[in-house]
Amino acid sequence: MRIIPILIFAVITSTAHAQPRPLSKRPYPIDTTLPLEQLIIELCDDDIKNNAEQAMRAILRYPTSPVDRLYEALDDHEWQTRQIACHLLWSIRTSHERFTSTNNDMMDTTSRYARSQRDLPAWHQSEYPPVTKRLVEVTIEGLRDDQTPYERVDRRALMYTNAAHGLFRLIPIAHDWIPQLREALHSDDNQQRIFAAMIAGRAGIASLVEPAAAELLPHLRDNDIREDAKFAVWALGGFDRELLPILQRAMPTADQQQRNLMQLLMLDLIDPPTSTAEREERGRRYNNISRSVHDPVTEPPREFCWWWVDEATAE
């Protein structure tokens, strides 16, 4: 998927996969009377406008749990069906968490489709889809540069972003899926490599420091890609001292911006800041890329903008 900004949504159009029954072109009412199997068919990349988005809504509002069938759809031969099934399973996990906490997850699709938790079927309270190997594989697959969230011709959008969502979903569980991330770091897809490197960095996976740093260090340079240094230095800041020799080797060929950021990385790795005053002081010395945070190594970017991935992976 080629990402423009985060939280801008995905697309649904193109080649026929089956002979789905068209849903209403109106976004409401949601037709939950269709059989679940029919709604799964509607998720595919076909020539019917808006049917996949309506099917997503209907599946999340289905009277009985669709979870088992969504796991089966992860093995569908059609890309979009797999990706939407994956997204819905993650969203159902978040929906369950919303019933048991006050966490406000801005990426929760269920809150977009169901106006409140009271509108969701009761199965959302009991269903908590496990993170399976196949779910992770399809999530990593979605880090690739595909046609979501925007279709290339008419730029229509739908309510999911597989790479942006996948990044934040995989970071907390990355240590359990190192072989899959290592494979993604050697992908033939530039965007997948960048996101896999960011996941490995923020998760602090020492065994992946070499390929991840090789992917991210060039983005610390002063280039024509907007925002890339902010996210690259934040991702690299998740590593520990195993990053230090790599930074030292890169120093002789660094430009001024890259040198400043690598010096900040080394300082924070050796002597992590312990106060706001310390972050402010280091920011004045080394931070020339962000006005929204003092220390971009230890403070996550506040601008959730991902157009730089589009530019960084452009041929």
Image (spheres, rainbow, N blue to C red):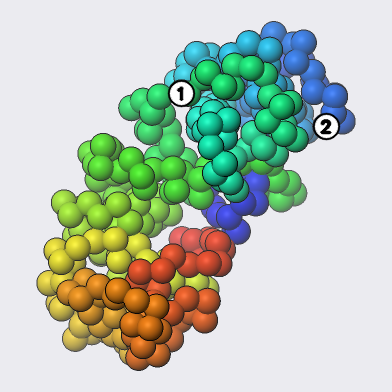
User: Residue at (17%, 74%) from the top-left corner?
Assistant: 270
Q: Earlier in the sequence, mark 1 or mark 2?
A: 2
Q: State which mark lies toward you, 1 or 2.
A: 1
Q: Nearer the viewer, residue 153 or 262?
A: 262
User: Residue at (55%, 67%) from the top-left corner?
Assistant: 303
Estimate the spatial distance between the alpha carbons at disc 1 and disc 2, rounded to whole Å: 27 Å
User: Residue at (33%, 82%) from the top-left corner?
Assistant: 278
Find residue 315 and report its horizontal and vertical position in percent: 48, 62
In the rendered image, which quarter is residue 214 located in?
bottom left
Q: Nearer the viewer, residue 182 or 187?
A: 182
In the rendered image, which quarter is residue 99 located in?
top right
Find residue 105 and report its horizontal and vertical position in percent: 56, 45
Q: Nearer the viewer, residue 219 or 155?
A: 219
Evaluate whether residue 13 shows in this view.
Answer: no
Amino acid identity at mark 1: Pro
Evaluate whether residue 142 shows in this view.
Answer: yes
Residue, disc 2:
27
Find residue 189 and report its horizontal and vertical position in percent: 39, 50
123 lies left or right of 132: right
Circle 1 crowding by C-alpha within 10 Å: few under 14, some 14–19, many from 20 = some
Mark 1: secondary structure: loop
Examine the rendered structure and indicate whether residue 69 appears above or below residue 24. above
Residue, disc 1:
129
